[in-house]
Amino acid sequence: MLNVTVWNENRHEQKNPVVRDIYPEGIHGAIANFLKEDQIEVKTATLDELEHGLTAEVLTNTDVLIWWGHLAHDEVDDAIVEKVKKRVLEGMGLIVLHSGHFSKIFKTLMGTSCDLKWREADDKERIWIIDPSHPIVDGIGEYIELEKEEMYGEHFDIPAPDELIMMSWFEGGEVFRSGCTYQRGNGKIFYFRPGHETYPTYHNKEIQHVIKNAVHWAKPVNRSYPVYGNAKPLEEIKAK
């Protein structure tokens, strides 16, 4: 059984009735619900829980962590960020959604500012699939079209992706690298752009399908973590 933890800061849902109406169980609850359709074991965690809900036990038992944050990136404890980073390097998958681009964990793993242009103006977004053979877009057509979304525009200050799977075009004219993968240590990372809190993006079946695919893609591979440091020779070193 694949074990997934959906992390959400859960602040917009408490402050904004529009967000509550769209996601009455929270963004984390909406994502958890459609993942459960895929017979995935899903837990949720939020910012205001003890250790942000990401205890050592939870992280140890998580195959893939999904991260959504926006208002309260600075409130995430640095010690928890380091624990999450360690687990990614050990092999835990990480899926970072929308405004999670500015989260401490994503910026730490990328090593850049992860900044971008943005606009809230009900732009149409067309997400073009530019790597149609990739398993994350299995079952998706040439593009996904969202009637209204927040615009994210280039330049997106991230390292060159290992794989660029999707590119967004917005009604106002901007483009954006909206589906990017990375490998860090033993772990796989997927950044997926759409998901502004005041739009019902996570109710869209194609968006759900991409996230389900990404969970299976990001799951750990069956190999042990490398041993680092001083090493004994595997073969006899003969005197010269």
Image (tube, rainbow, N blue to C red):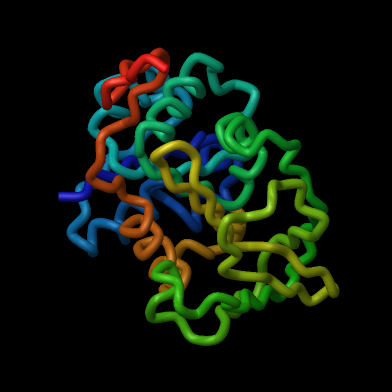
Q: Point out residue 130 in the picture as x, y percentages from the top left corner.
A: 60, 77
Is 56 rendered above or below residue 46?
above
Q: Is residue 151 visible?
A: yes
Q: In which quadrant of the rendered view does residue 239 lie?
A: top left
Is 164 rendered above or below residue 69?
below
Is 180 rendered above or below residue 170?
above
Q: Point out residue 176 in the picture as x, y percentages from the top left corner.
A: 73, 64
Q: Is residue 6 visible?
A: no
Point out the residue furthest to the front here. Answer: 240
> Who is closer to the viewer here, 126 or 234?
234
Q: Is residue 53 left or right of residue 190?
A: left
Tell me which residue sits at (31%, 50%) in the image. 219
> Who is closer to the viewer here, 236 or 105?
236
Q: Quadrant of the C terminus?
A: top left
Q: Point out residue 60 in the picture as x, y percentages from the top left corner.
A: 27, 28
Q: Is residue 113 left or right of residue 198?
A: right
Is 128 rendered above or below residue 142?
above
Tell me which residue sits at (36%, 65%) in the image. 213
Counting the numbered discs, the total is 0
Tell me which residue sits at (64%, 35%) in the image. 107
Tell me which residue sits at (67%, 65%) in the image. 149
Point out the residue furthest to the left here. Answer: 1
> Who is closer to the viewer here, 161 or 43?
161
Q: Point out residue 230 in the picture as x, y percentages from the top left corner.
A: 40, 13
